[in-house]
Amino acid sequence: MSSARSKFEEIGRILRAHQRFAVMSHVRPDGDALGSQLALSLSLQQLGKDVRVWNEEGMLEKYSFLPRAELVTKPPSTPEDFDCAIALDTAIQNRLGTALGAVRSAKIWINIDHHPSNPGYGDVIHVDPDAPATAEIIFRLIKSQSLPFNRDIAENLYAAISTDTGSFQYPKTSAHTFEIAAELIRAGLDVGRLNQQLYENYPRRRLELLRELLRTMRFEHGDRVASVSLSLKTSAGLGVLPEDNEGLIDHLRAVRGVIVAVFFEELADGKVRVSMRSKSEVVDVSAICQKFGGGGHTLAAGARVPGTLAEVEKKVMEKIGNVLESHS
Ligand code: AMP
Ligand code: MN
Ligand code: MN
């Protein structure tokens, strides 16, 4: 705990001492990536800093209701120089994608994350694998260092924590998480409205996608592994965006007896995006995904694996089968 405090003090000093910042997060961003970026950037702006808020995909349509969402842009093609570059919620540095290439130089790289698989790149590293969301670390940083805080920042943090904890359900959700949520609500945010924007405002095509995915549903390894697959042809036919499938995998994990849920998504670059969820600490999906060059958390991880859908499905299902057998 005291080492976290001194790390926050070090980061706080660096933030106050510099002027030009790039605040970035991972490709295929989720609510935690974008909400953490916006929250920290808004606090830095209030301190009078120049801040670039970059994500490879820019702001997603589904999170465009977040306060000051317009600050998140795609990185420019001409690289820029910074005093300080900050990577948030990004397990490996190259998952910053084109944002990484847009930083020509930075005197200091800060890495703030909660993925246990984060190898600790950068000059100042604060990786807390117990935190259920990067946004929880950002909240602690802001509060412990008396950095600017307001309702817009609170809404971004709440959206980030809510989405990364599966609405305060996943095992890393702690009493402290609820205490932070209470403080965020006290800052004046409207929980009902925010939850509607987060969870009751999906485009119809997301449900149409779910219908197609359920047609591909398979149960293997004694019904302990459930999977679905999405081909490029199906996504083009439905006109779905990459962001539309976030969370659909939870339908598989929610089935009684299922320990591992897997989502296979064919990508245009000859790779398959594999998204994995586990219901048991005994089956560490981050370890499985690391074998395929990916990473993540014990219960939620991913990888991008070269090959066709059928090839990757076979390889990945075999690996999961081996892990299950070694534990049964
Ligand atoms: P997803 O299944 O895409 O929602 O990702 C689940 C978790 O695994 C997230 O915390 C991601 O940051 C992490 N993750 C996903 N894909 C990768 C990858 N290719 N490499 C490292 N971590 C990943
Ligand atoms: Mn994330
Ligand atoms: Mn996260």
Image: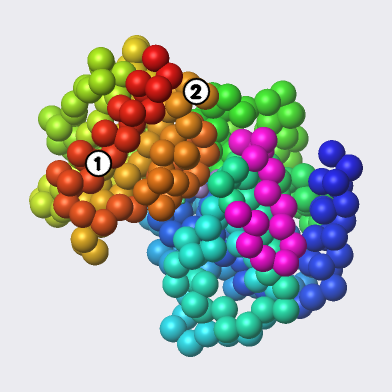
Residue 268 percent coordinates (x, y): 21, 61
| Residue 292 appears left or right of 12 | left
* Residue where numbered disc 1 is placed: 315
In which quarter of the view is residue 310 placed?
Answer: top left
Secondary structure of residue under mark 1: helix
Q: Which corner quadrant holds the N terminus?
A: top right
- Up/down of 288 relative to 294, above or below: above
Q: Can you tell which mark lies on residue 282?
A: 2
Along the line of sight, the residue nearer the viewer: 51 or 250: 250
Residue 16 percent coordinates (x, y): 84, 68
Determine crowd level at label 1: few under 14, some 14-19, many 20+ residues with C-alpha closer than 10 A.
Answer: some
Residue 53 percent coordinates (x, y): 57, 68
**Range of magenta residues:** 119-132
Residue at the location (22% across, 22% down)? Answer: 219
Asked if ligand 1 lies within 8 A of label 1, the reply is no
Please name the amino acid that badge 1 sits on: Lys
Please name the colour scheme applied to the rendered image: rainbow
Determine crowd level at label 2: few under 14, some 14-19, many 20+ residues with C-alpha closer than 10 A.
Answer: few
In three-dimensional space, the C-alpha distance between marks 2 and 1, rounded to whole angstroms, equals: 21 Å
Residue at the location (17% across, 46% down)? Answer: 311
In the rendered image, residue 123 lying in the magenta stretch gets the answer yes
- Up/down of 9 relative to 207, above or below: below
